[in-house]
Amino acid sequence: MDTNASEQQHNQKSELTSPAKAFDQPFLASKEPSTRVRVGHVLLLGTMTAIGPLSSDMYLPSLPTISHELGATMSQTQITLTASLFGVALGQLLIGPISDARGRRGPLLVGMILYVLTSLLCLVAPSIGLLIALRFAQGAAAAAGVVISLAIARDLYGGRTLARCISLLMMVNYFAPMIAPVLGSLLLSFTSWRGVFVTLALIGTVIVLVVAFGLSETLQPAQRQSGGVSASLADFRHLLFDGRFVGLALSLGFTFAAIFVYISSAPFILENVYGLAPQSSGVVFGINALGVPIMAQVNARLVGRASPQKLLIGGTAVLAIGSLALIGAVLTGVGLIGVLPSFFVLISSVGLIAPNAMALALGNVRAAGSASAILGVLQIIIGVVAAPLVGLGGSETAVPMALTIAVFGITTLATVVMVCRPGKIDTKAQ
């Protein structure tokens, strides 16, 4: 790390390097975490993390067409989405430990090459059964980008700079599910659903080329894990018995569970209970979605002035306030004037919670790949389990949705307060 005081001061004032200098040289790994976030890293790692949501959301407008063309029911067609999600979850558990043992670059290249191949196979799938299997394989391959991107960020950065980097990655990544359905619809205007997979294959090819020619190894041999499967299992066991790490991982999982509930329930509630047209409901979703990158940008600016755990506590407090305001608006019957601002507040909180929770969780772990995998899988599992629970209460009232979100919001705050007690988090992660 730089020892010159004036250069340190310059680095602190310029946390993000200019785009013009971002690709002057390959993304070299350093022995010490960098104090500056490079634009090249943000663009590449952001695209890698976005490959998962792009794979699922760009495909959404094609579902009815696929159902008709392959002679499948809508429920069978929807299984292709579920298969992709489970593929991402399982893939993270496999690829994370491999990247800790073999380095980041090799597993990332293999994973993304497989992603390109499975995407191309999806476009020629003759039946729904084969498409389901290929979508699972595509999701597992996409997991390489999702999990290794965070591990690379951890290799390159530390402490508050890592939190700032993740904030910027979120800004890039969160636009993916916002624009993916729009891109999918545009593609369908001049090509078939198979063209979506051609586009995904092209995106994967770009990542392969950038990694092959522009990314140096970020995990040096001396830092890698050895011991094969038994060592990987030991890493998982060590992480799962680390109360601090588990608490931060659960706080992320509970946060995204609240968001999953919102995503899966709000369209029905806004249209069935509050009488909004589908177009108006879409506008509401778009406005709320903007809150995350906006808050992530705020976090990127604040993280140099306040510690990540203070910002994390603040973010979970915002989530709890938004969820309590939502249930208050629903129970008092004030209508959309209370519901819509509550939605925006609780969704925006993710921009504060996610980067700081991830930075603190990854800050001092030995096996960043395995840790990233656990963080990603817990988010998927808790979210997938939580979302259907609201449906048990029906869609004629907003109370089940509001209650579920409030429970997760309060639980997240309580978990973070316990984890961030004095002495619980190593000051090196700050």
Image (cartoon, rainbow, N blue to C red):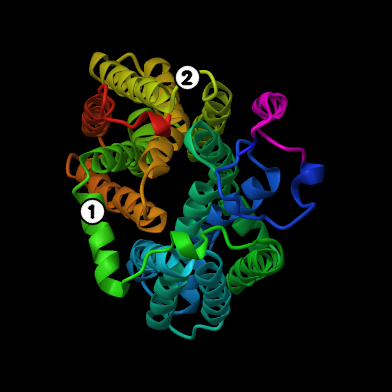
Q: Secondary structure at mark 1?
A: helix
Number of labels in the image equals 2
Which quadrant of the figure contains the N terminus? top right
| Left or right: where 88 falls relative to 402 | right
* Label drawn at residue 37: none
321 w.r.t. 144: above or below: above
Residue 81 in view (yes/no): no
Query: 10 Å neighbourhood of mark 1: few (<14), some, or many (≥20)?
Result: some
Image point (28%, 73%), residue name: 229
Amino acid at the residue labelled 1:
His
Q: How much space separates mark 2 and mark 1, taking CA atoms? A: 29 Å
Which quadrant of the figure contains the C terminus? top left
Image point (24%, 48%), residue name: 388
| Left or right: where 362 falls relative to 4 | left
Query: 10 Å neighbourhood of mark 2: few (<14), some, or many (≥20)?
Result: few
Residue 48 in view (yes/no): yes
* Label drawn at residue 306: 2
Front residue of 115/105: it is 105
Q: Secondary structure at mark 2?
A: loop
* Label drawn at residue 238: 1
| Left or right: where 293 falls relative to 327 | right
Chain part drawn in magenta: 3-18
